[in-house]
Amino acid sequence: MSEQKIPVIIDTDPGIDDAAALAIALNSQKLDVKLISAAAGNVGVTRTLENVLRLLTLFDKKVLVAKGAQSPILRNLETAANVHGKNGLGNYKLPAPNFSLLVKESAVAKIHQILTESQEKVTLIGIAPLTNYALLLKTYPSDISKIKEFILMGGAWGRGNFNVLTEFNFGVDPEAAKIVIESGLPVKIAPLEAGRTALIKPEVSNQIKQFGRVGRMFFDLFKTYRGGSFATGLKIYDALAIGILLAPEIFKFRTVKVKIETSGTYTAGASLFDLKGYLPSTSTAQVIERVDEKSFSRWFLNELKYWENT
């Protein structure tokens, strides 16, 4: 009997590292991607939606796509176009978007429908600001019973990349991160430090270049990506979230109490991963504490090798 696939929904804001995460997830024989919802984050949601649809054309994959919220719950959107390029994908020219995959429902409504109709609990993967998932939890609180767990790329043990102590995904919409983290559901997190450790070195990028048209695209994207240095190693943060599901043995996790700061003038979105029991919190998460760097690079390369003959 073949192994049953894990039903997942991916909320994403492509984003160069998002594109790599999607390439791996969509090829996995272990995952059943029910929906990709586009989030506002690295660039605006109109652009991230188009990027998802263009990537699906390139990947020749047919997965339903829904458009998410245009802005964070309470704040103005701040993007990362300086890191990912104005179009979110290094200004790389992708094939035309396949709009036939776009559903008429909003991301929240479509996720709710999928959860309601599913015979088993669904894993929600968040590799973007968590606005769409937070709105889902607030709009349809009974859906909690249909969610298996949240797997997130977000937060930081220490210094941030959005503000002094704040990582981008949590920092763009702190209120959404707080709602998801405090949902009471199991949460696994790949924080900023994991991406800073699990670098994709030049020798790996050069091998990926040989993996057909998709590999050549990633090689070109990696050369423009400002998440690290092409010469010394790239931080492909979002692929870590997919790795948590597909190759958890690569990581060492630590279960900690968590609070998300929402009111600090300079610290909004900061993730407080409590190591010593200071917080009066019942919200916990399994957070990556350490990455086996060589194993991650090997896994990343093997997962993308599928595209070798494209």
Image (cartoon, grey):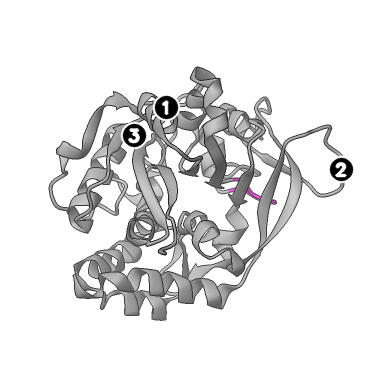
Residue receiving disc 3: 44
- Looking at the image, is 105 positioned above or below residue 203? above
Residue 72 image offset from top left, x and y in percent: 47, 26
Q: Amino acid at mark 1?
A: His
Which numbered marker is on residue 112?
Answer: 1
Residue receiving disc 2: 277
As rendered, which of 205 and 79 lies closer to the eye?
205
Using the rendered image of the protein, determine whether residue 286 is visible from the camera's viewpoint. yes
How busy is the neighbourhood of tag 1: few (under 14 within 10 Å), some, or many (20 plus)?
some
Q: Amino acid at mark 3?
A: Gly
SS at circle 2: loop
Over which residues does the magenta segment extend? 155-160
SS at circle 1: helix
Determine the image quadrant of residue 284: top right
How busy is the neighbourhood of tag 3: few (under 14 within 10 Å), some, or many (20 plus)?
many
Q: Earlier in the sequence, mark 2 or mark 3?
A: 3
Residue 9 image offset from top left, x and y in percent: 41, 42
Q: Amino acid at mark 2?
A: Gly
Magenta span includes 157: yes
